Image (cartoon, rainbow, N blue to C red):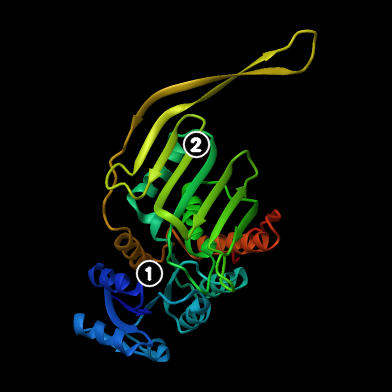
Amino acid sequence: MIGVAVVGYGYWGPNLVRNFCETPGARLVCVCDRSVERLDAVQARYPAVSVTDDFNKVLSDKRVHAVAIATPVSSHFHLAMSALMAGKHVLVEKPMTATSEEAQRLVDEAARRNLVLAVDHTFIHTGAVRKMRELASAELGEIYYYDSVRVNLGLFQHDVSVLWDLAVHDLSILDYVLDARPVAVSATGVSHVAGEPENIAYLNLFFASNLIAHIHVNWLAPVKVRRTLIGGSRKMIVYDDLEPSEKIKVYDKGITLNGNPQRNGEKVYQMLVGYRTGDMWAPQLDTAEALGLELRQFIECIQAGDTPSADGMAGLRVVRILEAASQSLAQRGRVIELQEARYVA
């Protein structure tokens, strides 16, 4: 059995605790939080689980083999690095760290110690996103665009902008679904609350091919929208995460391009655009809870020495994009080139 400690019992911690208690091969040993009231709530519901407000006790507990971190982003690096240096496997909430330099150091440390470093990119474990990955590689043809709207009213964050809070979901989905990696980003946004991070933002991602991605995130929308379009040369996808059923719809629609050479020897082609309209179908999706699948994979990777779907490198790639987007946003949309995330030899 893999002994697990959950650090942070605020918004997301209770979901981690509940799922770890139900994950085969895992034993929830301890929950760590600074709040006495939260720890009392843990003991009331899980009397067999130890509680502490001292993270050092988690690090020194030999029963703990893995640590799951669900705390504010600013604390991720210190907690995760301390856990790795104590020989613990780590699962850390997204975004993995506040800077790419911190993320790279965690990746390097985990590799040196042969420990599993996973990032809680929960969406990639949903049946809908896993189906999109399958369709993108087999059905859509050449991918033309990824266009996403992720908006709602609240919840305002004081430590991160709306990009780091909401766009991180789409960036993790993009990283998982598509083979291509962005080479540059541009972002614009604004804050409507003095002294607070941006609450509305628009992010564009550029690729080496003609693929382009656009992400709109907003904390000031009157309605909640979670909709993504992926367009390919053969088929297109509409993904609506708020749909109770048929979250994925696949459209056999698109365009056909025919080139006709002009006369008089000119090397110019008149492009004739034709429109193709076919059927729409909604594939059956796995309805298992994504977080449960993610934690099961995390435990299995520890046991087998495998690499999780959202490993430290995936977390690093997402943080690099967010960091570059923040730079672009501060310069009113200036295009920022992305550096390649490096692997440890």
Identify the residue under disc 1: 302
Position of 116 with respect to 145 (left or right) is left
What kind of element bears circle 1? helix
Closer to the camera in the image, 295 or 248? 248
Q: Quadrant of the N terminus?
A: bottom left
Q: Residue at x 41, y 76 (%)?
A: 69
Is 231 situated above or below 31? above
Position of 218 with respect to 39 (left or right) is right
The span from disc 2 to disc 1 (Cα, nearest Å) is: 37 Å
The answer to whether any part of residue 241 appears in the image is yes
Q: Residue at x 42, y 55 (%)?
A: 222
Nearer-N-terminus badge (2/1): 2
Q: Residue at x 43, y 74 (%)?
A: 90
Disc 1 crowd, CA 10 A, few/some/many (<14, 14-19, 20+): some
Disc 2 crowd, CA 10 A, few/some/many (<14, 14-19, 20+): many
Residue 216: x and y, percent?
52, 52
The answer to whether any part of residue 117 appears in the image is no
Labelled disc at residue 42: none
Residue 121: x and y, percent?
43, 61
Q: Quadrant of the C terminus?
A: bottom right
Labelled disc at residue 231: 2
Kind of residue at badge 2: Gly
